[in-house]
Amino acid sequence: MASSQCCENPPTLNSSFGQGSVEQIGGLKAYITGPSDSNKAVLLISDVFGFEAPNLRKLADKVGAAGYFVVVADFFYGDPYVLDKSQFPEWISSHGPDKAFESAKQIVADLKSKGISAIGAAGFCWGAKVVVELAKAGEIQAAVILHPSLTTVDDIREVKCHISVLGAEIDRSSPPELLKKFEEVLSATSGVDSFVKIFPGVAHGWTVRYSDDDEAAVKNAQEAHQDMLDWFAKYI
């Protein structure tokens, strides 16, 4: 279930932030970064605040610098959640991960048509559910979900690719008890490698909704980012 934590610490969106460019891919507008001639791609799927969040684009550039063609798509079609302007229950009912999953499949198909041979995906909060749906459908080779929302044990049972789960100790959307159930299910799933890590002392959203002025928060976020990169290096 999504919780109020999903809406806390909203970023200040910036459409021009980042080293990459905004282009069309798979029928969606997307922030694109990394080498255009790479045969390995990574999809980064945002939380409810969308693809213009500076910390997310900064991470995309970091993933691109590691040699991946990176896509951060606008699955909300210009209508991300805006704190104090949108009622979350109404917003989420019209911005469900199911629609984004269908759009993500179009992006995967587009990438494959361009010669991409291996694709990984990482999802943050809301985006984790989309990544899990891609993993269930066999659309990607590696998945990373960070402080996931809306993801169930039944979802995890159907995952078909190697998956890393990075969670927070303080998280009402995916508390440690739930992540431990994920771990139990994954450890019993043949042919799927898994990694589950719960970061102590951090709260939901810590990997992308941190302040650059908070040294400890930056360090915790960077540790998760490195875990994500290590997973992709291993499996895509």
Image (cartoon, rainbow, N blue to C red):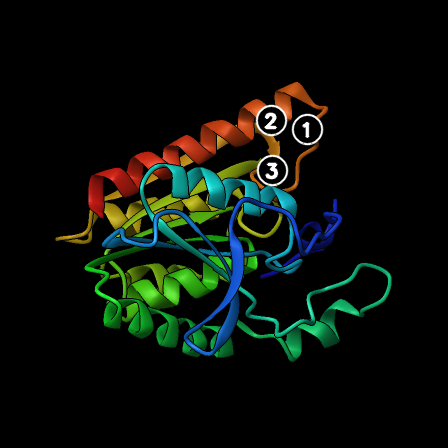
Write down the residue under mark 2: 218
In the depicted structure, whether residue 226 falls above or below residue 188:
above
Q: Which residue lies furthest to the right in this view?
A: 84
Considering the numbered disc 2 on the image, is that residue within a helix, a strand or a loop? helix
- Estimate the spatial distance between the alpha carbons at disc 3 and disc 1, rounded to whole Å: 12 Å
At x 45%, y 65%, the residue is 130
Is residue 132 visible in this depiction of the protein? yes
Considering the numbered disc 3 on the image, is that residue within a helix, a strand or a loop? loop
**Quadrant in which the N terminus is drawn:** bottom right
In the picture provided, is 95 more to the left or to the right than 138?
Answer: right
Q: Are marks 1 and 2 in contact (CB under 8 Å)?
A: yes
Mark 2, other Cα within 10 Å: few <14 / some 14–19 / many ≥20: some
Q: Nearer the viewer, mark 2 or mark 3?
A: 2
As drawn, the label of residue 206 is 3
- Estimate the spatial distance between the alpha carbons at disc 2 and disc 3, rounded to whole Å: 9 Å
At x 71%, y 73%, the residue is 91
Residue 51: image location, x then y, percent? 59, 58
Please state the total of marks drawn on the protein image: 3
- Estimate the spatial distance between the alpha carbons at disc 1 and disc 2, rounded to whole Å: 6 Å
At x 13%, y 53%, the residue is 191
In the depicted structure, whether residue 213 falls above or below residue 98:
above
In the picture provided, is 101 more to the left or to the right than 125?
Answer: left
Is residue 176 visible in this depiction of the protein? no
Amino acid marked by disc 2: Val
Residue 165: image location, x then y, percent? 39, 44
Write down the residue under mark 1: 212
Residue 173: image location, x then y, percent? 59, 52
Q: Do the residues labelled 2 and 3 touch (CB within 8 Å)?
A: no
Amino acid marked by disc 1: Asp
